[in-house]
Image: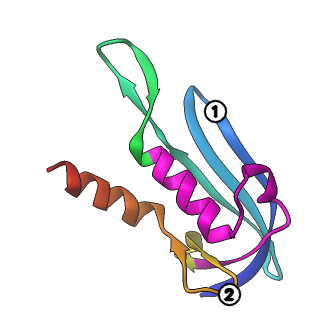
Amino acid sequence: MTINGRIKSSFLGFEQGMFTVHLYIETAHGTWGWGHYEIDNWDSKTQSRHGSEFGVDVLVRLLKVAGVNNWNDLVGKYVRILVKDNLIYSIGNIIQDEWICVPEMFIMSQEAKE
């Protein structure tokens, strides 16, 4: 099911020790949460977290899909959400056929490493 909505709030930062991103999107069907993706890497050698290429790709794609150049401009932007199994599977531009699907991005990033 595809639903139109407006980004109500955004978070970019550390949560439970990992660097993460999430959005809350207001729709006619209620408010939906998206994200809580781990967008950094744990380095067992240094026992610390570090930024990742995958995380940067997620952030850049999200900004492009929402049609903004700055994280602070996300709130209030209209987007589409594709819901599967009662979860947001992907977020799309409200007009253009541009989407971000983090699970698919993750699979492609893992395949590229092989």
- Find residue 9 and report its horizontal and vertical position in percent: 81, 55
Q: Which residue is mark 2?
A: 95
Q: Which tag, 2 or 1, sits closer to the chain's start?
A: 1
Provide the residue span drawn in magenta: 55-82
Residue 92 vertical position relative to residue 13 in the rendered view, above or below: below
Q: Residues within 10 Å of mark 2 (few under 14, many from 20)?
A: few
Q: Check disc 1 and give the amino acid type.
A: Glu
- Judged from the image, the secondary structure of the residue bearing numbered disc 2 is loop
Tally of marks:
2
Q: Is residue 35 left or right of residue 50?
A: right
- Find residue 101 and report its horizontal and vertical position in percent: 48, 68
Residue 58 vertical position relative to residue 100 in the rendered view, above or below: above
Q: Is residue 54 magenta?
A: no
Q: Which residue is mark 1?
A: 15
- Judged from the image, the secondary structure of the residue bearing numbered disc 1 is strand
Q: Is residue 63 magenta?
A: yes
Q: Check disc 2 and give the amino acid type.
A: Ile
Tell me the colour scheme of the image. rainbow
Q: Residues within 10 Å of mark 1 (few under 14, many from 20)?
A: few
